[in-house]
Image (cartoon, rainbow, N blue to C red):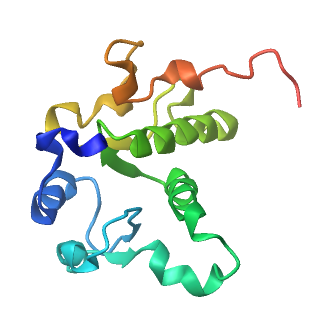
Amino acid sequence: CDFQYKDTRIEAHQIYANIKDLVADGTTIYIATDEREKKFFNIFREHYNVYFLDDFKHLLEDVNTNYYGMLDQRIASRGRKFIGTYYSTFTGYINRMRGYHAQKDKAAGWEKGIMNSWYYVPTHKRDDLVHYYPIHTPMWAREFPAAWRDLDNGISE
């Protein structure tokens, strides 16, 4: 379970405090979450234009609800910025897709395998993805640029 790590279970006001310098007030944000009580995110509504997958359910009438988590990941992977949880495999896959996109689109930092992604918790890991780090243990806790950097080197489209 991703949330077996007690330091990742923090209140919304703590999450906001950890990210407010990364996201300007008034920004439109998409929150990919399985949290059913959306009032948990009220502090974000005070500062941002907030959207959830639930806001678009009328467009998803023919989509099996079992796919909603994957759809959340696809949407989050295409944001200009992404902020997730270090130990989360849900966050990890979003970051891997962001790495693939960064390489294909030649986004800022793509040569080094870095991207505009951060962790809101734990705070000592916050900036790990905006700096290059080689693979190290624990390998499951985050994604590494080796998963996407130069993945298609020598292959032409």
Farthest-out residue, bottom: 58
Which quadrant does the C terminus fall into?
Answer: top right
Q: Is residue 124 left or right of residue 48?
A: left
Residue name at image x 31 percent, y 73 percent: 36
Residue 5, how many percent across, how many down? 17, 38
Residue at 59% x, 22% y: name it: 149
Residue 123 showing in the rendered view? yes
Residue at (50% x, 31% y) in the render: 109
Q: Is residue 36 above or below residue 73?
A: below
Looking at the rendering, which quadrant does residue 17 occupy? bottom left
Q: Relative to residue 148, is residue 59 depicted above or below? A: below
Q: Quadrant of the N terminus?
A: top left
Task: Identify which residue is drawn at 59% across, 87% down.
Answer: 58
In the rendered image, residue 116, in percent from the top left (x then y), is placed at 42, 42
Image position of 118 with respect to 13: above or below = above
Q: Quadrant of residue 137?
A: top left
